[in-house]
Image (tube, helix red, strand yellow):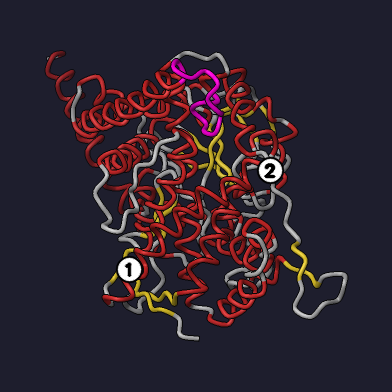
Amino acid sequence: MADLDHYFSICLLLLLLLVFPLVLVFRSLSDSSSSSRLQVPIAYPIFGSIFQIWKNKERRVQWIADIVNSTPNLTFTLHRPFGYRQIFTGNAANVEHMLKSHFHNYHKGEAFRRTLADFLGGGIFNADGDNWKFQRQVSSHQFSAGSLRKFVETVVDSEIGNRLIPVMANAAASSSVLDLQDVLQRFAFDNICIIAFGYDPSYLSPSLPVAEFAVVFDQSLKLISERFNSNIPFTWKIKRALGVGKEKQLKIKVGEVRKFAKRITRKKILELSRNSDLASEDLLTRFLQSGHSDEDLITDVVISFIIAGRDTTSAALTWFFWLIHNHPEIETEIITEINELSEKPIYDGVKNMIFTHASLCEAMRLYPPVPVSTKSAINDDVLPDGTVVKKGTRISYHPYAMGRSEKVWGSDWAEFRPRRWLQAAEDGGAGKWRFVGRDSFTYPVFQAGPRVCLGKEMAFLQMKRVVAAVLRRFKVAPAAEAAEPVYVSDFTSKMKGGFRVRVEERTE
C-alpha cells in the first residue's frame, strides 16, 4: 500500500506540473487582455513571467521598453523561470550610477562572459579588469584625430567612390529594387575589416557577391544572441554539452569565423616578421606590435571590433534614410547643408555638418543601434531610485526605452525632430546652428563613463560622409509604401526583412 501511495503521489505531482502551467497561461493572458494599462508582468513560482515573455518574444525590445516607461521610476524587475531575475532601467540616474559613479561594481560578469565566450572570447566587449584596460589602451590610438582624418579621406571615400555610388547608380539606371540595409552592412563590413585587419573583403563590389566570412559571421551573431537571450540559461548548456540543435550549429559557425580570423592574423604576423617597421595603420598591427602574442586573444579583439564597426553604423543609417524619406522638409535642409559645405575639404566639410549630425542623433534616439546593454552586480547595491540590487543580478539599461520616454523628451517624443538637438548659433547667421547634445547618461547610445564608445567620432564621420555622398546625387525611397518597418535586434538592431528601396538620380 505504501508503494501504491508513493506511486499515486508521484502521479499527482506530475499532473499538477502539467496542469498548473496551463492555468497560469490562461490567467496570464486573461490579466493582460482585461486591462488596457500596461503592467509589470506577474511572476509565478518556478515559472516566473515566462508566459508573458513568450507572448512578446517577437517584440521583446519594444515590450520591455513599454513596461519601463509605464513605471514611476523607469525601472522594473523581470522574473524568468527558476529564480533568474533581470532588472531593466531607463532611469538616467541609475545609468550614471552603473556606468560612472559605481563603475567598479557593475562588470560584464562571469555569467555574461561564459555565455558569449564561444564567440567573443576575451575580446573587449566580453572583458573586465586589466584585460579590458589593456585592449582599450591599445585601441584608443586607432581613434586619434590624425587617424580619423585619414580614415575619412582614404578608406571611407574610396569605398564610397569605387563601390557604394556605383552600386546605387546601377540600381538607378536599371530601376531595380535594392536592399539598402544589406548594402550599408556591406559598406561598413569592408570599412571595419580594413581598419581592424588591414584586409579588404570587397563585400560591396558592384556585383554584390556572397562573402563567405560575412555570411557565417551573421549566422554566428544570430545564434549567440539567441543563447544570450535564453529564458532558461541552463538549457543551452545542456545542448552544448550534448552537441545538438542550435548549439551544434553555433560551434560549427564560430569555428569557421575564428579559422578565417586566425588566417588573417597569421598573415599579418608573417608581414611583420618580414618588415618589423610596418606602419601601425590597422588595429591588428597595433596589437601585434604591442608585444602581445596570444593569437586567440588577438582574434577575439578583431571579432569584437567587427561587430562594433559593422552593425552599428549600418543600422543607424538604415533607419535614418527611412525617417528622412518620411520627412522631406528635413531631407531638404540636409541637402542644403551638404551643398553649402561641398567646397570645403572632405574632412572639414563632414565635421561641420551640424544639421545632419543632429538628424542622425535623432534617428538613433528613436532607433538605437544597440537597444539594450547588460551588466552584472559584483556586490549588493541600491540604485539611486531605491531599487535593491543583489550580488550577481543582471541589470540592463535600455537606450530604446530611454529615447522614447515622455518624462525626458516631452510630449512630442514620438516625432522625428532634429531641432531638439540644436540652438541658433551665437553669431546670429541665418540658418546657422549650434549642436547641443544631451549628457551621455540620458542618451547612452554610445555607452558612457569609462566604457564610452571609442569609435563614436569615427562612426559620426563615416555616417555623415555616406549621407553627403548619397543624398547629393540620389533620391532614396521605399520600394513599397507600407507601415513602419519592424525593429528587431540581435545584439544590434535591424529592419526585419531588410529595407528595400528604389534609387533615382537627382535632376536638380
Q: Badge 1: how crowded within 10 Å, few (<14), some, or many (20+)?
A: some
- Left or right: 81 as drawn, with respect to 98: left
Q: Quadrant of the N terminus?
A: top left
Reply above or below: 28 against 229.
below
Q: CA distance from mark 2 to mark 1?
A: 36 Å
Considering every residue shown, the one lying at the far bottom of the view is: 508
Q: Residue at x 31, y 31 (%)?
A: 257
Q: Which residue is mark 1?
A: 500
**In this orientation, which residue lies closer to the viewer: 63 or 202?**
202
Amino acid type of the residue that numbered disc 2 sits on in the rendered structure: Ala
Which secondary structure lies at badge 1? strand
Residue interval drawn in magenta: 272-286
Q: Residue at x 37, y 54 (%)?
A: 56
Q: Residue at x 69, y 72 (%)?
A: 419
Q: Which mark is residue 477?
A: none
Q: Which residue is mark 2?
A: 145
- Left or right: 351 as drawn, with respect to 328: right
Q: Position of residue 245 (x, y in %)?
A: 19, 32
Reply above or below: 458 against 391.
below
- Left or right: 348 as drawn, with respect to 243: right
Q: Residue at x 47, y 74 (%)?
A: 473
**In this orientation, which residue lies closer to the viewer: 344 or 359?**
344
Amino acid type of the residue that numbered disc 1 sits on in the rendered structure: Arg
Q: Assess whether residue 488 is covered by the magenta stretch.
A: no
Q: Position of residue 490 (x, y in %)?
A: 39, 46
Reply above or below: 199 against 508.
above
Q: Position of residue 105 (x, y in %)?
A: 66, 26
Which secondary structure lies at badge 2? helix
**In this orientation, which residue lies closer to the viewer: 180 or 206?**
206
